[in-house]
Image (spheres, rainbow, N blue to C red):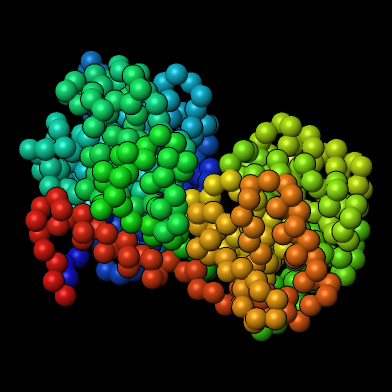
Amino acid sequence: MRRLKILFVSPEVDPFVKVGGLADMVGALPKEVAALGHDARVVCPLYGSTKRVGEWKARQEPLGVDVGAEARWARTWETALPGAEVPAYFIEHEEYFGRREVYSDAEDNVFRFAFFCRAALALCEQLQWIPDVIHCHDWTTGLLPVMLNTTLRDSALGRSATVFTIHNIEHQGQAPFGIVDFARLPVSEYRSDSLESRGHVNMLKAGLYHSSKITTVSPTYAREIRTREGSFGLDDVLRVRGADLMGILNGVDVANWDPATDTALPANFSADKLEGKAVCKAALQKQLGLVVDPKIAVFGVVARLVHQKGLDLLAESVGHITERMQVQFAILGSGDARVENAFRTGTERSAGKIGAHIGFDPRLARLIQAGSDFFVMPSRAEPCGLTQMYALRYGTVPVVRATGGLVDTVQDYVAGADQGTGFLFREANSAALYQAIGRACATYYDRPAELRAMQLRGMKVDFSWQTNAARYVDSYRWAIAARTGEAFVE
């Protein structure tokens, strides 16, 4: 099989800029694809908050970007993904990306990413490097496949296939009609089977209709988004494109997330030598003002406190849980003010039982993963989820709602059956969450040997990118075949 040229176009890439799991994926997958022998590269906007990790250099030639009434100019910076020879390009444009926010609330937010799509394609032409496949990520890149299918169809880029990954179908990029002219797209594309949705341009929908192939970040989520309940209005599109959609589970950067080598922890540990986990638990209890007691079950939370993550369900019941069960909660997150206040109040009323840090602290996040006995994710929707995979690697047993990638990564515990890696519950309500935490507590106090076996099973599950990177390469070849008719034979 020939070596492929693959460009990852993304609004985030770890460790340079990160809002969520999308950055983790784009920071890890290109390295694994390159390790398989392919020419993988990444392009991302240069925000005011971007971390300049490693060596950077600016390209001397300015980048002309054909948007609006006349071309705009940008500057391109070059670096590489840490630990790999994967080029990473960052597009600098003060008006659109000089601000610190990745996803701005400003009226020009959709125009920023339309500009980014054109800039990514202009960069390929400037580099005289034409990718076989352009891997697009979420609504911010939705107009790029439209550009390839219309104004660039007869250019050198016209043969480039596209793979479009849905990370979260809830965010779709609703834009005014004016973006059609701004992005220099044909007005004829403003129709229901292309750009238009309910009187607006829907950038995610555009990407779904125009991409060669579509992926999402777990097999279960691929099924859920084809339903009316799980699609946020795009079930018709995904049923039309259903034969071109596949769910590929995200992986974990196992070198970065390894309790045996993690420098953020007060003590390291492994499945063969777990003693360091108790040290981490004591440090966590002390840092968050919990009673330092190795015998008490600690439930950890690291999440955005938003409706999708379901932490309002825990906020409703956390006081009742701490009254009825011998438990502690270690909580890190921010978001919905009501949920934040509920956890603050719980910390005040249940001193020593609930410890909440409102905000984000990457070292504390890792300590919660390592020092907790259980990890709580009551998500209403979870396309893939990475934190439950991190928890499993760190010997922390997940308590999760059975949705999306949580179903694909956590096997439900059955007492006495020597199986399971966590506790699943079905209904998105506080009563179901209460019962699941009760099951976990009963196992912790009444069946410690079974809990230890469950910990070890979870720590040994392989969540590395290697297998799924190969599946993505298959999707690239599948997309190329659809775009060009080129057949790949083993």
What percent of the width, then of the height, locates residue 377? Answer: 64, 53
Coordinates of residue 40 in the picture (x, y in percent): 29, 57
- 476 up-or-down from 123: above or below: below
Asked if residue 354 lies left or right of residue 419, the reply is right
Asked if residue 237 is positioned above or below residue 134 in the image, the reply reads above
Question: Which of these two is toward me, 307 or 63?
Answer: 307
Q: Is residue 213 left or right of residue 283?
A: left
Residue 271, by quadrant, is bottom right
**Quadrant (top left/top right/bottom left/bottom right) for the C terminus:** bottom left
* Left or right: 72, with 393 as reference point: left
Quarter placement of the N terminus: bottom left
Q: Quadrant of residue 328?
A: bottom right
Q: Residue at x 50, y 63 (%)?
A: 408
In this orientation, which residue lies closer to the viewer: 46 or 329? 329
Residue 444 at x, y = what percent? 79, 71
Above or below, 79 relative to 234: below
Query: In the image, what residue occupies the spot 41% across and 53% down?
Result: 223
- Is residue 282 or residue 335 the one in the foreground? 335
**What's the residue at 34%, 19% (across, down)?**
199
Task: Reply above or below: 484 against 45.
Answer: below
Q: How many marks?
A: 0
What percent of the width, then of the height, locates residue 284? 80, 59
Q: Would residue 263 be seen by someone viewing this image from the given angle?
A: no
Q: Residue at x 32, y 35 (%)?
A: 205
Q: Is residue 244 visible?
A: yes
